[in-house]
């Protein structure tokens, strides 16, 4: 994978991961109530779930890649259209709606409980597998070794997922206040949506 494509991939995954959602709200809540050290278990639970979802997506893509180049290209186009769709929906959604989530019960302070909470909340989002299936083909080069590219992308994903969870854990209540009141927070969904739309359009035009 070219360094430019890898940096673009990392940017997209980071923006997708940092958006406030159930997993990030859990990290935020655990960070506030139990501190960032205990919340490492929360971050690990989310990371394991994210990597698992990525492997599921990759397994299906690997079979398609080795059996049908045409089908793989069709998936690439469909994935690009899906990324554009996500970008449009994000662009239209106010950040206040994104943050309007139900509180999560965090009475159990055991690290295992925190790990499993994060794991099952992340795994409970099947759209992540669809997202990874749409995202990965956009950054796979047919000139290189697909397996090595998949490994690099999965490792990068795991590091980013862990980092984003810890950012929310450490920031605590200040993160919510920042996203609700700052200029960047007000335009976060529009910025993220614009990136998704751009990536999707670049893929369509390039092919």
Image (tube, grey):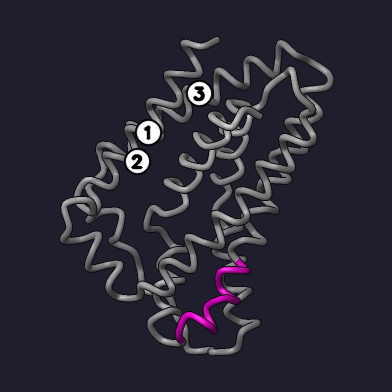
Q: Nearer the viewer, mark 3 or mark 2?
A: 2
SS class, disc 2 = helix
Residue 192 - label: 2
Q: Is residue 131 above or below residue 116?
A: above
Task: Please check the rendered image and state whether residue 39 is part of the magenta-colored stretch, yes or no.
Answer: yes
Q: In which quarter of the image is residue 100?
A: bottom left
Q: Which residue is drawn at 50% across and 23% down?
A: 80
Q: Residue at x 55, y 26 (%)?
A: 79
Q: Give the range drawn in magenta.
A: 35-45
- How far across and down, in percent of the image, does residue 25 sit? 40, 67
Q: Residue at x 41, y 86 (%)?
A: 33
Residue 80 - label: 3
Q: Which residue is drawn at 56% across and 62% down?
A: 162
- Labelled pair 2, 1 in contact (Cβ < 8 Å): yes
Residue 173 left/right relative to 25: left
| Quarter of the figure that contains the N terminus | top right
The residue closer to the viewer here, 100 or 169, is 169
- How far across and down, in percent of the image, does residue 120 sit? 60, 65
Q: Is residue 57 above or below residue 145?
A: below
For the image, the number of numbered tags is: 3
Residue 195 - label: 1
């Amino acid at each position: 994978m070219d360094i430019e494509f890898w940096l673009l991939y990392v940017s997209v995954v980071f923006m997708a991961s940092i958006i406030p959602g159930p997993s990030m709200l859990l990290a935020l809540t655990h960070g506030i109530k139990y501190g960032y050290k205990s919340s490492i278990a929360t971050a690990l639970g989310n990371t394991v779930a994210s990597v698992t979802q990525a492997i599921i997506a990759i397994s299906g893509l690997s079979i398609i890649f080795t059996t049908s180049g045409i089908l793989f290209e069709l998936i690439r186009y469909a994935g690009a259209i899906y990324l554009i769709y996500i970008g449009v929906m994000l662009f239209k959604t106010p950040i206040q709606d994104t943050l309007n989530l139900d509180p999560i019960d965090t009475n159990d302070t055991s690290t295992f409980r925190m790990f499993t909470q994060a794991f099952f909340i992340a795994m409970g989002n099947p759209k992540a597998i669809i997202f990874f299936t749409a995202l990965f083909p956009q950054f796979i080069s047919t000139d290189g070794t697909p397996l090595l590219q998949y490994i690099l992308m999965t490792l990068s994903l795991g590091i980013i997922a862990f980092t984003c969870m810890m950012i929310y854990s450490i920031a605590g209540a200040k993160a919510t206040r920042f996203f609700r009141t700052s200029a960047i927070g007000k335009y976060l969904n529009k910025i993220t949506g614009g990136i998704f739309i751009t990536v999707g359009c670049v893929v369509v035009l390039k092919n």
